[in-house]
């Protein structure tokens, strides 16, 4: 029988059976309460095998979820990576909040668990506290924001600007707006040069007033507002963060969709908002066993699940357009990419 569910982090005492995998191997690799530092509590669940795989994994993906975290914690945060041509789960963490200080602690703890960890790329959402923390701890890592989250952010502001109906009902209107999404696929140092001619096209001139609020948001957040000296201020998110060109070039996934898919699946498995800590850990143990089985199958040569044909075809077309960048006008390039975006 599980212990009583603690009401606070101070009440949480974790019995031995909730510190190991189903197979009895160490699973709770870090509990900050052991250090008696007085800082908000962090728990990290992983295995030595997973940490070893992480050292050989260049591309990391991270995301957090709130509904599946036990009520005494703020969020479940997970790190995944590409291994055996598939995105696999490496590490679970229960975090007390989403402050930059906590993220710095979390990433420093991971690094202390395995000093050899040196990811080449790190994909995440556009949360500044996480971005700043990763820059501090993994200073040589290239950060990439999820293209899906970028597109969703633009869509939210299309709605906020009162443009949603026009976007849905007028295909030419939508295509021209999607050219802004398509800027993600331009070489980073050429994005500004690609953006400014867009504003000089007939569509943007004719709709200047209608689009003013949306473009004001777009420039301040993603491009940088134009100053009097004709230079641009730093945007909220640097161009390199939301640019996909090199991800497409080297066949690296440009979204966190597989990670979000895992979180959605895990939430369904729990079938409860903010479950008890004991139900939650039991679910982690089952997930670890399933994940380990997947790793061994992929190691043995089992083919990972294939993308749907329509998504593979779209990715192939986008890569072909990117490879043909030098042979196209900027407008043709952006239009070609935009036609492949949903």
Image (cartoon, grey):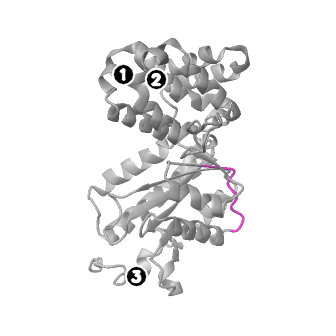
Are dots 2 and 3 in contact, CB under 8 Å?
no
Q: Which residue is mark 3?
A: 15
Displayed quadrant of residue 249: top right
The answer to whether 46 is drawn above or below residue 166 in the figure is: below
Closer to the N terminus: mark 2 or mark 1? 1
Where residue 188 appears, x then y in whole percent?
67, 35
Closer to the N terminus: mark 1 or mark 3? 3
Residue situated in front as seen by the camera: 256 or 211: 211
Classify mark 1: helix, strand or loop: helix
Q: Which residue is mark 2?
A: 177
Residue 220 visible within the image: yes
Residue 309 visible within the image: no
Q: Which residue is mark 1?
A: 167
- Does the magenta portion include 191? no
Residue situated in front as seen by the camera: 98 or 275: 98
Classify mark 3: helix, strand or loop: loop
Closer to the N terminus: mark 2 or mark 3? 3
CA neighbours of label 3 inside 10 A, class few (<14), some (14 to 19), many (20+) = few
Figure label count: 3
Relative to residue 296, is residue 69 drawn left or right? left
């Amino acid at each position: 029988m599980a212990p009583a569910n603690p009401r606070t982090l101070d009440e949480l005492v974790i019995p031995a059976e909730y510190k190991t995998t189903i197979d009895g191997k160490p699973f709770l690799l870090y509990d900050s309460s052991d250090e008696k530092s007085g800082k908000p509590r962090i728990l990290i669940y992983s295995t030595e095998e997973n940490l070893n795989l992480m050292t050989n994994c260049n591309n990391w993906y991270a995301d957090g979820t709130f509904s599946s975290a036990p009520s005494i914690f703020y969020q479940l945060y997970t790190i995944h990576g590409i291994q055996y041509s598939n995105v696999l789960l490496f590490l679970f963490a229960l975090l007390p909040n989403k402050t930059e200080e906590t993220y710095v602690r979390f990433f420093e703890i991971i690094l202390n668990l395995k000093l050899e960890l040196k990811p080449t790329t790190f994909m995440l959402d556009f949360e500044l506290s996480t971005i700043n923390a990763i820059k501090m701890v993994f200073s040589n890592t290239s950060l990439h924001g999820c293209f899906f989250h970028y597109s969703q952010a633009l869509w939210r502001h299309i709605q906020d600007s009162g443009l949603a109906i026009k976007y849905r009902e007028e295909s030419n209107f939508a295509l021209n707006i999607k050219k802004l999404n398509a800027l993600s696929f331009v070489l980073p140092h050429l994005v500004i040069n690609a953006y400014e001619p867009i504003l000089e096209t007939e569509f943007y001139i004719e709709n200047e007033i209608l689009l003013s609020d949306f473009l004001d948001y777009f420039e301040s957040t993603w491009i940088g507002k134009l100053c009097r000296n004709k230079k641009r201020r730093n945007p909220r998110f640097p161009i390199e963060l939301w640019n996909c060109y090199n991800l497409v070039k080297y066949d690296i996934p440009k979204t966190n969709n597989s990670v979000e898919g895992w979180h959605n699946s895990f939430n369904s498995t729990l079938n409860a908002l903010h479950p008890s800590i004991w139900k939650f850990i039991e679910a982690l143990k089952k997930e670890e066993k399933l994940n380990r089985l997947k790793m061994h199958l992929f190691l043995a040569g089992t083919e990972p699940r294939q993308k749907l044909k329509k998504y593979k075809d779209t990715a192939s077309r986008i890569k072909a357009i990117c490879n043909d960048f030098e042979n196209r006008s900027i407008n043709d390039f952006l239009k070609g990419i935009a036609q492949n975006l949903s």
